[in-house]
Amino acid sequence: MKALQKISFADMAVAKRKVKSDFFGQIDKIVDWRPISNLINKHYVKGMSVTGKPAYEGLLLFKMCLLQTWYGLSDYEIESQLNDSISFGKFCGLTLDNVSPDHSTLSRFRSEMTKKEAFEKLFKLMNKQLEKHKIIVKTGAIVDASIIDSPLKPKGKPVYEIAVDREETEQTTEAIEREKKEIELIKRVSPGVDTEAKWIKKASKLRYGYKKHVVTDEEGLILGVLTTSANINEITNLEDVLATADLPQNIALKADKGYQSKKNEELLGRVKLKNHILKKEKKISHLLHGRQNSTNW
């Protein structure tokens, strides 16, 4: 029972999902990737690889991000799957002779698109097409958050520099003494550090990056996404996340215990969504009744 309680709604959805080439074929057939690719190219400039060859197309990297969300894969896992799975490779436009982009390439792409808030626009553009063809049917929704690591994190000990609030006046003894008091230390940001990312401690491990708050349907297709710095607690911004998804009223919203609060309970009542957020155990001697820890699927 305890093990089951640790499984998130997103984990359960992923566990039910299987790789199906016909699904990928259906998506490729109905989605016009041209406007999506054009939007990606506005935010992501393809350069050259270390070997001097043209870098991977932004659309390929975006499709890798889609597969990650649909199947709950890490950067290392999606790299491996793309090299091993014909279905994955074909969906992303790779032939058997091509090698998948490595995890660091994908990480850099995702960080760049995240900083420019491009993912939100991309998913809205894609979802318009999926809804038109009835691929997305909003009968229920799941909210989940995951951390996106930035490859441009600070390294080593913080470096400080001296900042002086100096006036261009005659340097009398009195002025010099006053100036000394105005000297202060400020933290210097190393070149190349992603200053918009933030630190967070997760499972006793420090991570530096962003947090991706995603709304999906019960099949795992993305309805909306909001990206924040990693240190933002998901319990505080549920209203902003829901605003990205355009959900119909009276459907069930499912989420882990981390979203459970009086404020969010009132929010769901106000926007007329059924509250299927898992309940937290009360800090008293007895545990919650079994049905309060059920998933209510």
Image: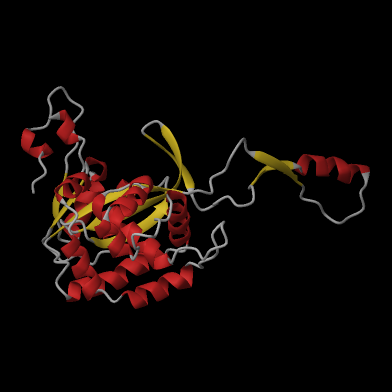
Does residue 259 lie above or below 285 as drawn? Answer: below
Can residue 144 be seen? yes
Q: Nearer the viewer, residue 290 or 102?
A: 102
Side of 233 relative to 6 (left or right)? right
Q: Quick one: which residue is furthest to the top in this view?
A: 285
**Image quadrant in which the N terminus is located:** top left
Residue 201 spot, x, y in % from top left: 42, 36
Measured as percent of width and height from the top left, residue 40 is found at 42, 70
Q: Position of residue 118 (x, y in %)?
A: 41, 66
In which quadrant of the rendered view does residue 37 lie? Answer: bottom left
Name the side, left or right, on which 112 lies relative to 279: right
> In this view of the protein, can residue 214 be seen by the observer?
no
Q: 17 and 277: which one is in front?
A: 17
Q: Is residue 50 rendered to the left or right of residue 84?
A: right
Q: Is residue 94 above or below residue 190?
A: below
Residue at coordinates 22% horizontally, 60% vertically from top-left? Answer: 221
Q: Is residue 217 above or below residue 290?
A: below
Q: How many numbered discs, if any?
A: 0
Q: Residue at x 67, y 40 (%)?
A: 159
Quarter of image, res 138: bottom left
Asked which colour scheme the image uses, the reply is: secondary structure
Residue for point 44% across, 52% down: 107
96 or 124, nearer to the observer: 96
Which one is in front, 250 or 211? 211
